[in-house]
Amino acid sequence: MITIMDEEILQLLRENPSAFFSGEQIAKQLKVTRTSIWKRVRHLRAAGYEIEASTRSGYRLIRSPDRLSSSEVKPLLGTHRLGRKIHYFQTIDSTNSKAYELALGGAEEGELVIAESQEKGRGRLGRHWFSPPFLNLYLSVILRPKIPPQGASLITLMAAVATADAVQKFTGLVPLIKWPNDILLRGRKVAGLLNEIHSEVDRIHFVILGMGVNLNVDGKMFPKDVRRVATSLKKETGQRISRKAFLLVLLQELERWYAVFLKEGSSPVLKAWRDRAQIKGRPVKVHSFGETWIGIAVDLDSDGALILETAWGKKRVVAGDIEYKNKMSNVKPQSPNGKNTISNS
Ligand code: BT5
């Protein structure tokens, strides 16, 4: 574990990367003994930091590992709103659960929870998110937009657009968004979003934007059921991805799109989402609250619901999963086996 004292030592070493910092100076600044500095330096080396030590001159930071701790990320951040405070964990049950707890306790807009791995990474509807250590990105962002709860799905769409833009800026590859919030490369999921809100009837208290992006995980590592549907940036580009560098781009894109959403409202977000999703006119099978609908995707409604043309007329689907079908003739029309969750538009 990287302690606060470790962070402070690193901060001092980073201030003047080309020069040595004597053990005595560091000890004086942090008001501890030289022996405890030496112990922490040994610990930092074991954690992957390359620190040169000279008996005469002191310590010099040569190279940092690809870690996403506050001291690694914050000095590089180009954002204003996002990341002013970073809660970092080597491992955690779920960054979303932690962010929710922090937000209930008064954490401010823009605070981030970042973990190197998740023991109970969560997908939507109680599903699991595969979260192996030190390979990918597991991030939750606390937002406090002054909007009614009905606007929450627009925040999800906004985050999907920002993630897709970040992937494209970083790799040059062009991702597609699959309704509601999967980011796909060559038809496989490279990122997923889990957004949770806490609200009263007419206003949101906070939104937790949960983002999982597969960066360096190898295809073979995915559990069998996930392997068929998932990919990573490394797999798609053939190159190892700097998680820190990707995180910086992702936060910049998210901050940019959030500002657009707050200033200009939903239309630029919906337009960008439609461009990225290319769903109009595609035959789809939709699973929503235990019901299955088959039809042609007509559009995205202004609140983010999917509008479907079915044999029973137009349907609005507010939540669920879709499968793309190549041709309508490949799918048998199926009548829904319930009501309420899908309403006539
Ligand atoms: C999602 O759910 O796609 C939302 C995933 C959100 C994960 C982030 S990580 C940080 C934050 N903290 C959390 O606890 N969660 C968020 P859904 O659409 O329900 O997709 C889940 C399905 O995707 C699973 O049932 C698997 O089939 C598949 N899957 C699981 N792990 C995956 C992975 N690493 N990459 C691609 N697909 C995966």
Image: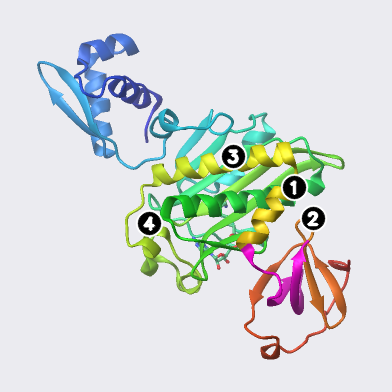
Please tell me whether residue 61 belongs to the stretch shown in magenta: no
| Residues at marks 1 and 4, CA–CA distance in whole angstroms | 33 Å
Local secondary structure at mark 2:
loop
Foreground: 290 or 321? 321
Label 4: how many Cα within 10 Å (few below 14, some 14–19, many 20+)? many
Identify the disc placed on residue 302: 2
Foreground: 265 or 311? 265
Please tell me whether residue 286 belongs to the stretch shown in magenta: yes
| Residue stretch in magenta | 277-300
Identify the disc placed on residue 256: 3
Could you tell which of marks 2 and 1 lies nearer the N-terminus? Answer: 1
Could you tell which of marks 2 and 3 lies nearer the N-terminus? Answer: 3
Amino acid, disc 3: Arg
Answer whether residue 202 is visible to the viewer in this image: yes
Residue 252: give x, y in percent of width and height.
Answer: 52, 39
| 271 to 71, vertically: above or below | below
User: Where is mark 1, residue-wise?
Assistant: 266
